[in-house]
Image (tube, rainbow, N blue to C red):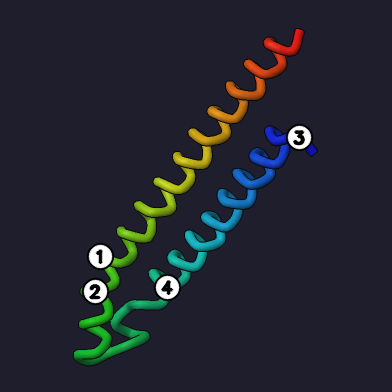
Amino acid sequence: MSREEDCLADVRRIKRYADEIERTLDSVEALKGEKTWQGPAGNNFRNDWKGHNQAIRDALSAARAEADRVYKQVQEEEGKKKAAAK
């Protein structure tokens, strides 16, 4: 496998794992309602969850963007190597 192919495989894995994490966040979001968990502990969790949920989603977005950036950089570097080898 070439460096570019390895990088693309890593990018795909990162995106797949990020999607899995987002599905898990969506599941927690669906289950955190007051009917599921009542009382002060439930209220505290829901209040805390808002911030944690957004922070995790922001981190996933940043990871996806960084993976894309690195892949583009690898593509450029490999293109330059190929051009120099000619």
**N-terminal-most mark, 1 or 4:** 4
Task: Identify which residue is drawn at 25% across, 65% down.
Answer: 51
The secondary structure type at the circle numbered 4 is helix
Is disc 4 surrounded by few (<14), some (14 to 19) or many (20+) residues within 10 Å? few
Q: Is residue 56 left or right of residue 81?
A: left
Q: What residue sits right under mark 1 in the picture?
A: 51
Q: CA distance from mark 2 to mark 4?
A: 13 Å
Determine whether 46 is above or below 38 in the image.
Answer: above
Q: Which mark is residue 2?
A: 3
Q: CA distance from mark 3 to mark 1?
A: 40 Å
Q: Nearer the viewer, residue 55 or 2?
A: 2
Q: CA distance from mark 1 to mark 4?
A: 14 Å
Amino acid at dot 1: Gly
Taking the view exactly as shown, the residue that stands out farthest to the front is: 85
Q: Which mark is residue 28?
A: 4
Q: CA distance from mark 1 to mark 2?
A: 6 Å
Q: What residue sits right under mark 2 in the picture?
A: 48
Amino acid at dot 4: Val
Is disc 1 surrounded by few (<14), some (14 to 19) or many (20+) residues within 10 Å? few
**N-terminal-most mark, 3 or 4:** 3
| Residue 20 position in % (x across, y down) | 56, 61
Amino acid at dot 3: Ser
Task: Identify which residue is drawn at 41% across, 77% down.
Answer: 31
